[in-house]
Every structure is written in structure tokens, then in C-alpha cells.
């Protein structure tokens, strides 16, 4: 955990003492010492005394003053890096350990401490890229190991509450004409998700997960049935005339179907160096759903118009009336989403970029992500992320933006908030872990999360999500050919509870 202090070990203290003594001997062995050597002696002596007293803030202050004045050497960087770790500022520490490695090429102690500072920023694969630079003793001290190693496992259960899940009434759905209208919506539902993070080498992190969603989907139709009914019979000298009227019956009917989505997630993260990494994601998912299909056609009604009993003369008439019938269609879609994301660390700022390709309901989708991650305090106590997303589909391009904030008020508690706004349909996030594939037109997601580390191994999580969207319905209108579409606002609220076991 980042909040755990790292005291300077005897190995590093001895290393610094040896360096200090060597520099003194080197300097006293030359009578014509330059002003630069004198400055290095003074800075070395001062910062070493501050290191022994564990006055980390003052060590950082004096070290920064020396660097600003042009004095820079290996042991100064090592001491400032250790001070940064002690002050819970791993980004500051990483900067100094990198400089120490430049000044003493191949230095294993600096590489080990740089790996530690990266681990405290949850940059595990970047830290793993340094593993092979360490000797066997320091590899053991790093707590990184070769071979298979489980990292964390989680299980989440969620329930989605939807507003307006009763749908529209007949007048709203059928429109002014009152002839025909249709809409599709979901009832409340639960879903389950589980996954495992594991390593096969220090710089390789994998994730495999599975999710299942079962939803009661409703196809609602509003239509009018027409029947011909007799009004009266008027008898005359020439015969009998028959009169009729058309009777209208308004119908509103729901056809409930079951929708099931099963998804398999695979991710591989690779630390190319201590500054950047790549994450490849793959999602395979299958959706099964039955649809009710309306069939509106014309029927011909024939009946008696006039009849003369005396002569037996019969005259008939015919009229066309609409007839609505329904049938069921079974539908299945096997789709995928692949992505490749990279991140490059620039101290407190990390630049991110990604490219994704998906097949959603047999439609091709391409996605581009550009963003940043920021640690304003130089550690994980406060984190911020911003990301711009462009989704390219057959019917054009769509844009979205995400902003998130994470805050650790205490060592065991993490609070998170996130807003995702724009045209979200067919968008994939979290390396394709979530794909917005639903009949509503999504435009806003708000999420808040709470995590509590109950023990060193067990973390409890609770999340809340709110989605805002527009639900489409179609109806027959006199001014257009075919069906006219309209929308009304809906929301859904999701509660997610989960447990995470940290190995």
C-alpha cells in the first residue's frame, strides 16, 4: 500500500556512507580543488546529515536548491528519491531515481527503488519492466516473481431499476391518427460479473472475466381493429337496401420476450519500459432475443348491398379494411470488440491513447480514444482522468467525453465519481469491458463508487450508476410514408455490490 512508510534500509545507508567517504577521499587527494568540488562536498555533507536525521522535507528543499544552482550527483538523487518515498510522493521519487540511473548506468539499487515508486502508483507492469535489471537478491526484495501469480479476483452483482418501464398508453403510442404504434423497452433486471487478474511475468498482467445479463424485454404495440357491422335494412318497392358502419376497437398489447447476453473478457497488459505500457483487450459476446414482428395488411370485406326478394336480384359491395397480425422472430448475434491502448508517463501526468474495432449487431464500429491521467498531489490520494472519444459508424461519427475523479481520504477508503456525456450508443469503455448496446439513445452516465479495504486481502465495493437516455417509439402519421419516429426521456439507476480478493 502506498501509505506504508519505507525506511532507508541498512544496505542503502551503507551505500550512501561509502559514497560519501569515497567522495571525501577523492576531494582531499587533490590540492587544487575547484569551487564545484567544494559545492558538491557541502551539498553531500548537508543532505547526508538530513538523511540520517530523516528530515525528509528539509532534504527535499536543500536538494532542490542545489539542483537549481547546478549541483547534481548520484547520491543526491538517491537521497531525494528516498525522501520522496518517505513523504508519499512516488512521482517525485521516480524522477530522482531515473536521474540516478542515468548518472550511474546499470545501477541496481536505483532500479529497485524506481520499481517500488512505480508500484505505489499502481504501475505494476512498468515496474515489472525493471525486474531483469536486478540481481537475484534485489529481485527477492522487489516482491516481484517470475511465473504464474494471481493478483486479484472479484465478483460483482448488480440490479438495474428503470423509470418509465410501463411504456406509453394507447393515445401516446398510436399518435394522432390512432392507427398503429410500437415501442421496445426493458424491465428491471439483475446481472453478474466475475474476473481474475494474474501475472505470468513481472511485466505481464492479464485479466479474464465473464458477465451474464438476463432481461425481460417487452415489445409493445398499439393498433386499431376494424370490423363491419350492420346498421339497418330499408325495405322498398324495388327491394331491400342494407346499411353498415365500421366499428373501431383500440388495442394495446405487450409481448414479453427474454433477452440473454453472455460475454467473455480477455485483457493483456505489457510494460514496455518504466515509462510506458500497452493494453490489448478482447470481448466476445453473444445475445439471444425473440422479437414480436407486426404485419399490417389489408383485408377485403364483402357483404350485401341490395336484395330484391321478388326477382332474386342480389347486389354486393366490397371494402378494404386494415388487419394487424403478429409473429415471433428468434434473433441471435455473436459479436466482438478488440482494442489496443497505450499510456506514457510524464511524472504526475500520463498521456493515454487507444484504438478499438467492434462488431455490434453485425455492424462495424471504429473507436478512437485520447486522454490523460493526472495525480495532482504526486500520489494516489487524488487522481483525475479526462478522455475524448470518437465513435465512427455506418451512419456517421459521434463524440463523447469522460471526466473522473478519485479521492482517498483515508488509507483504506477510496471514493470515485465519473461523468460520461455525448452520443454513447455503440461506445466501448474500460478496454471494451462495457459496450453500450441497447435500444435507447444514451447521452449521459453518472457513476459514484465507494471501496473499503476490510483486511489486507479483502476489499468491499459499492457503486451507483445513473443513465439518461431517450426511448424511441414509432407510429403511423398522415404526413409521412411508413412509420414516424419520436422520443421521450427515461432514466435507469444501477446498484452494484462487489467483493475483491487481493492475493
Image (cartoon, grey):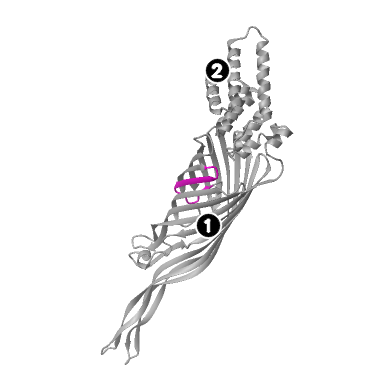
Query: Which residue lies most toward the bottom here?
Result: 310
Q: Is mark 2 on a helix, strand or loop?
A: loop
**Span shown in magenta:** 410-429
- Position of residue 70 relative to residue 108, above or below, is above
Categorize mark 1 by other alpha carbons within 10 Å: few (<14), some (14-19), many (20+): some
Categorize mark 2 by other alpha carbons within 10 Å: few (<14), some (14-19), many (20+): few
Q: Which mark is residue 158?
A: 1
Closer to us: 476 or 443:
443
- Position of residue 343 relative to residue 284, above or below, is above
x, y percent for residue 25: 68, 14
x, y percent for residue 372: 51, 38
Query: Which residue lies most toward the right here?
Result: 136
x, y percent for residue 438: 49, 56
How much space separates mark 1 and mark 2, taking CA atoms?
58 Å
The secondary structure that dominates the magenta segment is strand
Q: Which residue is drawn at 61% across and 22% down?
A: 48
Q: Name the residue under label 2.
A: 70
Q: Which quadrant of the rendered structure holds the N terminus?
A: top right
Mark 1 / mark 2, whichever is N-terminal: 2
Q: Does the magenta stretch include residue 243?
A: no
Amino acid at each position: 500500500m502506498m501509505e506504508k512508510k519505507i525506511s532507508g534500509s541498512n544496505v542503502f545507508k551503507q551505500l550512501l556512507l561509502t559514497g560519501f567517504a569515497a567522495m571525501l577521499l577523492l576531494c582531499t587527494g587533490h590540492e587544487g580543488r575547484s569551487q564545484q568540488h567544494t559545492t558538491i562536498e557541502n551539498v553531500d555533507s548537508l543532505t547526508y546529515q538530513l538523511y540520517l536525521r530523516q528530515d525528509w522535507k528539509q532534504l527535499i528543499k536543500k536538494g532542490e536548491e542545489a539542483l537549481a544552482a547546478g549541483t547534481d550527483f548520484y547520491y543526491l538523487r538517491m537521497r531525494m528519491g528516498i525522501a520522496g518515498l518517505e513523504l508519499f510522493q512516488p512521482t517525485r521519487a521516480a524522477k530522482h531515481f531515473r536521474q540516478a540511473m542515468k548518472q550511474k548506468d546499470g545501477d541496481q539499487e536505483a532500479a529497485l527503488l524506481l520499481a517500488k515508486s512505480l508500484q505505489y502508483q499502481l504501475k505494476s507492469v512498468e515496474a515489472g519492466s525493471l525486474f531483469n535489471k536486478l540481481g537475484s537478491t534485489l529481485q527477492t526484495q522487489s516482491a516481484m516473481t517470475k511465473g504464474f501469480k494471481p493478483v486479484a479476483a472479484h465478483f460483482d452483482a448488480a440490479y438495474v431499476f428503470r423509470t418509465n418501464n410501463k411504456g406509453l398508453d394507447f393515445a401516446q403510442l398510436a399518435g394522432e391518427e390512432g392507427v398503429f404504434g410500437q415501442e421496445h423497452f426493458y424491465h428491471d433486471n439483475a446481472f453478474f460479473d466475475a474476473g481474475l487478474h494474474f501475472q505470468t511475468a513481472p511485466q505481464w498482467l492479464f485479466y479474464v472475466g465473464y458477465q451474464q445479463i438476463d432481461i425481460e424485454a417487452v415489445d409493445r404495440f398499439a393498433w386499431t381493429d376494424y370490423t363491419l357491422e350492420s346498421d339497418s335494412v330499408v325495405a322498398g318497392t324495388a327491394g331491400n337496401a342494407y346499411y353498415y358502419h365500421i366499428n373501431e376497437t383500440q388495442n394495446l398489447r405487450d409481448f414479453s420476450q427474454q433477452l440473454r447476453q453472455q460475454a467473455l473478457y480477455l485483457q493483456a497488459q505489457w510494460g514496455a519500459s518504466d515509462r510506458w505500457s500497452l493494453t490489448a483487450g478482447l470481448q466476445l459476446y453473444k445475445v439471444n432475443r425473440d422479437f414480436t414482428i407486426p404485419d399490417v395488411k389489408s383485408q377485403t370485406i364483402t357483404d350485401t348491398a341490395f336484395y330484391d326478394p321478388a326477382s332474386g336480384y342480389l347486389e354486393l359491395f366490397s371494402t378494404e379494411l386494415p388487419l394487424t397480425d403478429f409473429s415471433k422472430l428468434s434473433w441471435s448475434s455473436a459479436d466482438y470488440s478488440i482494442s489496443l491502448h497505450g499510456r506514457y508517463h510524464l511524472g504526475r501526468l500520463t498521456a493515454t491513447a487507444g484504438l478499438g474495432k467492434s462488431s455490434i449487431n453485425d455492424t462495424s464500429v471504429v473507436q478512437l480514444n485520447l486522454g490523460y491521467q493526472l495525480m495532482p498531489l504526486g500520489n494516489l490520494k487524488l487522481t483525475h482522468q479526462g478522455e475524448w472519444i470518437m465513435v465512427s459508424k455506418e451512419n456517421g461519427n459521434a463524440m463523447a467525453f469522460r471526466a473522473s475523479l478519485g479521492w482517498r481520504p483515508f488509507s483504506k477508503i477510496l471514493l470515485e465519481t465519473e461523468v460520461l456525456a455525448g452520443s454513447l450508443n455503440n461506445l466501448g469503455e474500460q478496454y471494451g469491458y462495457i459496450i453500450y448496446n441497447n435500444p435507447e439513445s444514451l447521452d449521459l452516465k453518472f457513476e459514484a463508487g465507494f471501496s473499503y479495504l476490510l483486511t489486507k486481502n479483502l476489499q468491499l465495493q459499492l457503486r451507483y450508476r445513473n443513465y439518461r437516455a431517450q426511448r424511441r417509439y414509432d407510429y403511423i402519421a398522415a404526413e409521412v410514408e411508413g412509420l414516424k419516429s419520436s422520443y421521450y426521456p427515461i432514466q435507469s439507476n444501477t446498484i452494484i455490490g462487489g467483493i475483491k480478493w487481493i492475493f
